[in-house]
Amino acid sequence: MNLSAPLAWLVDHAGASPSPESFLAELGRRLLADGLPLAGGALTLAVPHPIIASRTWLWRAETGAVIEALDFPGSPPTKAGHDWLAGLGPVQADVAGRASNSPLLGWAWAGEFSPDEAERLRQVTRFAAAPLAALAAKAAQTALLEAYLGRRTAARVQAGGMHRGTGETIRAALLCTDLRDFTALSEVTEPAAMIAALDAWFDRVAGAVHAFGGEVLKFIGDGVLAIFPVTSPSAAEACDAGLRAIVAARAGMTHLDKTRQAQGLPPLPFGAALHFGEILWGNIGSADRLDFTAIGPAVNLVSRLEGLCRPLGRSVLISGAVAAETTTALVPLGEHTLRGIAAPCAVFTLPGD
């Protein structure tokens, strides 16, 4: 059986595509080279994700560029791709598989198309089912790992970094945050309401961390440990990103507390500490149950520094190591002894805290 060039590629090589967007771009390019007058293409995959129902990649024949659109629960899962294609010309879309959540592959014509051309695209969808199933499984695995582990750790696990005792040293600004009086609040609050409060708190902190290029390493009870890795010779950029994230999180919590007050609910006071140093982000645990954990003196210090927020009556404390790297105006609070830390720590806070 002689296969066309696009079908041969689907059989022999498409399964090795590094990502759905590269698959769509390469398939579209090959179909154009095979004489099909396409204006664009769209590929939709359902993903197991806390807030995303499906991801759609949109390819434009004129430029070869691929962009991504997200569908959220409650919206039609194919709407983004279909509407975009319809703006380019007549549309043909086929499910590349038999399951209800199978990948959806769609194309738009630059002009009129013949029954023969439509049949050729149906054959393409048929041959694309196997490699797309592999890509969908990989995308689902990536989404699950990133949701539970974060991007950095998920990438390491997928790359085979699952050996106990392995790790990497990271220079970063470390953010440690914790809700105040959480235990007392949980004793008098219904579990569902307590979970909703925790989710709202984590949304503000994690949202601020991610907005400024950081990564949440751990949710620990009602606390968060996050890092802003150094990506240039200077550590100032990482420290400044951590400071901006704290300001954003504090603004978000101020708004949340006003909303809770209007609902007759108590505020959610918190403490946050920022330090700069090296951590070992390592794979530890038992032989059959592993966890990625941040360890090292810098982690100990930022945790102890956060615990100083209540005695000092502050919501934000910043170490001298951060102050030495940033030009942001900080308010000195003197040197303080931290439990379990040998040397006194120079402590600062933000203006107005």
Image (cartoon, grey):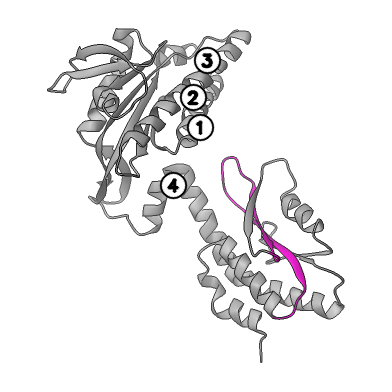
| Mark with earlier residue (3, 4) | 4
Q: Say whether residue 24 is magenta.
A: no
* Residue displayed at 47% across by 32% down: 206
Image disc number at residue 4: none
Tell me the magenta residue range: 34-62
| Mark with earlier residue (1, 2) | 1
Q: Quick one: label 4, few (<14), some, or many (20+) residues within 10 Å? A: some
Q: Quick one: label 2, few (<14), some, or many (20+) residues within 10 Å? A: some
Q: Based on the displayed image, in which of its 4 quarters is residue 233 positioned?
A: top left
1 vs 2, front mark: 2
Q: Position of residue 321 (x, y in %)?
A: 25, 27
Q: On the image, numbered disc 2 is attached to which residue?
A: 248
> Quadrant where the C terminus lies?
top left
Callout 3 secondary element? helix
Badges 1 and 2: C-beta atoms under 8 Å apart? yes
Q: Say whether residue 58 is magenta.
A: yes
Q: On the image, numbered disc 3 is attached to which residue?
A: 254
Depth check: give the residue in front, 273 or 320: 320
| Mark with earlier residue (3, 2) | 2
Q: Position of residue 6 (x, y in %)?
A: 65, 79
Q: On the image, numbered disc 1 is attached to which residue?
A: 207
